[in-house]
Image (spheres, rainbow, N blue to C red):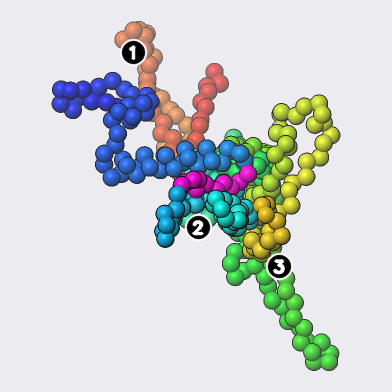
Amino acid sequence: SRGHSGAGMRAGKLILSDEHEDAERFRSLHGQQVLNARNVAQEAQQMLEAGNGIAFTCSSYSGKVPAWGEVELRVDLFSDMCGVFRDRLIVDVAGLPTVHVPIVAKMTGTPVALEGATLGLNMMGGVASLDFGDILQDNTVQNRQVRVSNNAPWPVAINWKLLESAPPQGANLINLTSSIDADGKVHYGVIAVEPEQADNPPYKLEPERLIIPAHSSKAVNIACEWDTPSHHENFLVGSVQVLPKDAPMPGEESVADKGRVVEPLDLLDREEAQTAMLQDVSAGSHLVDMEELVVGLRCEVTRAWLETDCNKHLKWICSTSHNYKTQASFVKEVALSNRGRCNLTFNLKVET
């Protein structure tokens, strides 16, 4: 932010920190909302430092209950991981048996998401899209990066694949088939809808398996190059796997990690997971699987189309100048017209 001096609204020195907010608190409604959201985020970060994926806190941990009265306590839940969780609240009142109040929660959604601040990435629609625009055939490789953030306390691995069409959603998950045999009996079959893998797409991924540490972010590079004019539309799909917390990160392996095979954690189906699965334990958790990351990719490969205003050659008809100081050269102009939608780079040379 930029401070203001006492003489009117003239801008003062540039402020590169938020320390002044301790003395000059925001007084507007939106300013108070910003401060409140920041305080909630700081409190959640402190509560989730243990890395369990969930945390419970009470508004008060001790107090008095008046005669013929009651005390209402607020219990807050903080979470940075999806799954089913179970804990218990222990209430100890002097002179009475200890009471255990079960606490159960099912957290949905996903802590792994695409970062919006990516060049060319459109997050406005139902499916994110990345448009390479028009590129020239046999031209230099066009690169785009898609950054993925992991807000979970576990490291994750994202396996990327390129599909010809969008993955099925909602009511398009299965195909129902029927057939009649020789006896007249009708047989039904259910086939899962699986879109085809992209056949020789113009995109190359690096890396094809992206490993992201806990509470961090990394980017996958998408390179686009093609040799013939054509239109390409594909879908980049990333399936999320949760890795053990002690899994070595790429480039940080120790001698003891050489040859170690890191298996992802077993995840429950997010639709079938229920808190009743933990009814036999006092405290525990089961992680559930996450939705796939989907990005639509588009590029239009075109050929260069350049025109000039001289069809054959440049021709001069003039007398030779004996004094180069007064008549240094004879000038003609050539217009190069780009009739395509891509920027072109040209080089000129004279043989003599």
Location of residue 208 in the rendering, given as x and y in whole percent from the top left corner: 69, 42
Q: Secondary structure at mark 3?
A: strand
Mark 3 Cα shell of 10 Å, populated few (<14), some (14-19), many (≥20): few
Quarter of the N terminus within the rendering = top left
Location of residue 327 in the rendering, given as x and y in whole percent from the top left corner: 33, 13
Q: Secondary structure at mark 1?
A: loop
Q: Residue at x 55, y 50 (%)?
A: 94
Q: Residue at x 73, y 34 (%)?
A: 248
Which residue is labeled 3 in the image? Answer: 192
Q: Are marks 2 and 3 in contact (CB under 8 Å)?
A: no
CA distance for labels 1 and 3 = 81 Å
Residue 117, can we see it? no
Q: Secondary structure at mark 2?
A: loop
Location of residue 268 in the rendering, given as x and y in whole percent from the top left corner: 70, 57
Q: Residue at x 66, y 52 (%)?
A: 283
* Mark 2 residue type: Gly
Which residue is labeled 2 in the image? Answer: 126
Please state the extent of the stretch shown in magenta in the rendering: 52-63
* Mark 1 residue type: Gln
Location of residue 19 in the rendering, given as x and y in whole percent from the top left corner: 36, 26
* Mark 3 residue type: Ala
Q: Earlier in the sequence, mark 2 or mark 3?
A: 2
The residue positioned farthest toward the left in the image shown: 8
Which residue is labeled 1 in the image? Answer: 327
| Residue 60 belongs to the span the image colors magenta | yes
Task: Look at the picture and state if 8 lies above or below 95.
Answer: above
In this rendering, position of residue 20 left or right of residue 106: left
